[in-house]
Amino acid sequence: MTSYRLDKLTVHHQAGTRAPALHAIDLVVEQGEQLAVIGPSGAGKTTLLHTLACAHAPSGGLFEALGQQPWTLSGKARHKLRASLFLAPQTPPLPPRQRVVSAVLAARLPRWSLAQALSSLFKPADPDAAYDALARFGLGEKLYARVDRLSGGERQRCGLARLLLSSSKVFLVDEPLSALDPALSQLTLSALQQEAASRNATLVCSLHQVDMARANFARIVGLRDGRIVFDAAREDVSDEMIAALYQNESVAPAPLVPHETPERLAVGACF
């Protein structure tokens, strides 16, 4: 089964803008594949992930997700399709006053009735499952902490723990290592890749850390100025290709937020 088929896909952030955010993208991703998307800041990595999550409507070209063309479906059918696609943004939109256990269990909301969802806010429906998911990211002890007491890196991993409790067939993960030190980065990537492999889910992960992408992903897509520069097996990605991709940029950009620093970041809005 093919997770995605993109043919000459073009995306504009606003109708009428001249420069597309993504231009003539050709990409095929099979179910169960794991690939890293790399490129300089502003290359279009986040836009690509949001497009794959059916959050951005393309302005041209072909876009198929899980065998369907999302933007030809009814709103209800497109919403059902989105339930199979888990988008983990770089700054997860976790309610600041909510307990971590509730934030993680929110991954099950699409499968719960309204009564179940409201009940779980007062008495978490499955705290053991939430603990197990958090523990895989080194956060088990934060189960009953408030979200606004977490550091930036802890919030990132809390958002990723949601993924483990979802029933999604595709994981779309945007810069999951930006607030993590090297040891936590490897732990986080390993947890994501193991989970994807265990359920034959597709994993598309954007990364600033080129060394981590080359060490952990068999397929690497290089994106620059909204275009795919290369799409290759990691053994075919040379230092010269990386240098060209990041021309006038740093190959290993500094993290976007400090490593595991105390809370000083704006908390994302709640869904």
Image (cartoon, grey):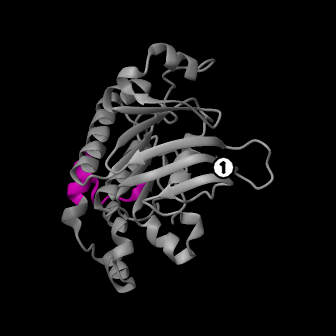
Judging from the image, what secondary structure is the residue with disc 1 in?
strand
Residue 73 falls in image quadrant: bottom right
Q: Would residue 135 be counted in the magenta stretch?
A: yes
Q: Does 194 appear above or below 220?
A: below
What is the quadrant of the N terminus in the image?
Answer: bottom left
Image check: 226 left or right of 159? right
At label 1, the amino acid type is: Val
| Residue stretch rendered in magenta on the structure | 131-149
In the displayed structure, would residue 55 be above or below residue 189?
A: below
32 relative to 250, above or below: below
Residue 201 at x, y = what percent?
31, 53
In this rendering, the answer to whether 101 lies above or below 155 is below
Tally the numbered discs: 1
Q: Mark 1 points at which residue?
A: 11
Q: Position of residue 134 (x, y in %)?
A: 26, 53
> Picture quarter containing residue 183?
top left
Residue 121 colored in magenta in the image? no
Is residue 41 in sight in this rendering? yes
Q: Residue at left 40%, top 42%?
A: 153
Front residue of 103 and 203: 203
Mark 1, other Cα within 10 Å: few <14 / some 14–19 / many ≥20:
many
Corner quadrant of residue 24: top right
Q: Is residue 245 left or right of residue 188?
A: right
Picture coordinates of residue 2 (x, y %)?
39, 53
Does residue 255 appear to the left or right of 40 in the view shown? left
